[in-house]
Amino acid sequence: MDPNSSLSRGYMHDVFPSFCGQDVRKTFLSHFLEGLKREGINTFIDNGIPRSESINSELVRAIKEARIAIVILSKNYASSSWCLNELQLIMECRLTLGQTVMTIFYEVDPSDVRKQTGDFGKAFEETCDGKTEEEKQRWRQALTQVAVIAGEHSVSWASEAEMMSKIVMDVSNELPSCSKGEIYDVLRV
């Protein structure tokens, strides 16, 4: 077996998407996930968590066991402490585990994410209300770090379909060919 394959490295998923559901779940994300699926890319989907399992522990495990984290930053992303905690863990995994992190700036300016300004910054400040300084600082650091990762910016594209195709191709190119699709069949045997 290829030593770079997802299975030999302990990866259970090719991709973990981090997103704010109210902004993208029924629109952009649903089409994006379909594109990844067509390419045989194993993606963690949060609605697949068994009813008896703790959502938080399953998400933590899924983040740590994904080869690539795709962070879809949107206008309400920073309004969710859940999203900000995911992002913090993703950035830690990038540093400690070498996880690849890809960014999509969906209808939000990367500068607003980096500096926590504009509507994005207002949402962030509201989420920070009542939190400890330490927690706020960790979130700020994670947002600043993720915002400087070169990614796709939705306003730069003529259509979402073209942007999604490009991102799916980028993800596919990032993965060893043996990790897509058929390697997960080995787990079911």
Image (tube, helix red, strand yellow):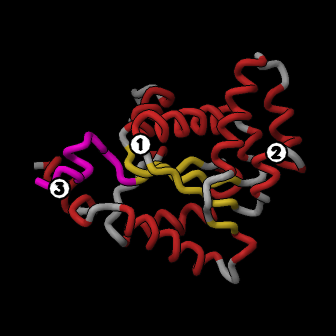
Q: Name the residue under label 3.
A: 185
Circle 1: element type: loop
Residue type beneath disc 1: Gly
Q: Mark 1 points at which residue?
A: 98
* Of callouts 3 and 1, the N-terminal one: 1
Residue type beneath disc 2: Lys
Q: How far from the left and from the top, in percent, is residue 126?
A: 85, 33
Placement of 141 over or under 1, stated as above or below: above
Q: How far apart are marks 2 and 1 (CA)?
A: 25 Å
User: On the picture, is 133 further left or further right than 73?
Assistant: right
Closest to the observer: 146 or 11? 146
Q: Mark 2 points at which residue?
A: 115
Asked where in the image residue 85 lies, by quadrant, the reply is: top right
* Marks 3 and 1 in Cβ contact (< 8 Å): no
Local crowd size for mark 2, using a 10 Å CA cut-off: few (<14), some (14–19), many (≥20) = some
Q: Does the magenta stretch include residue 122?
A: no
Q: Does the magenta stretch include residue 13?
A: yes
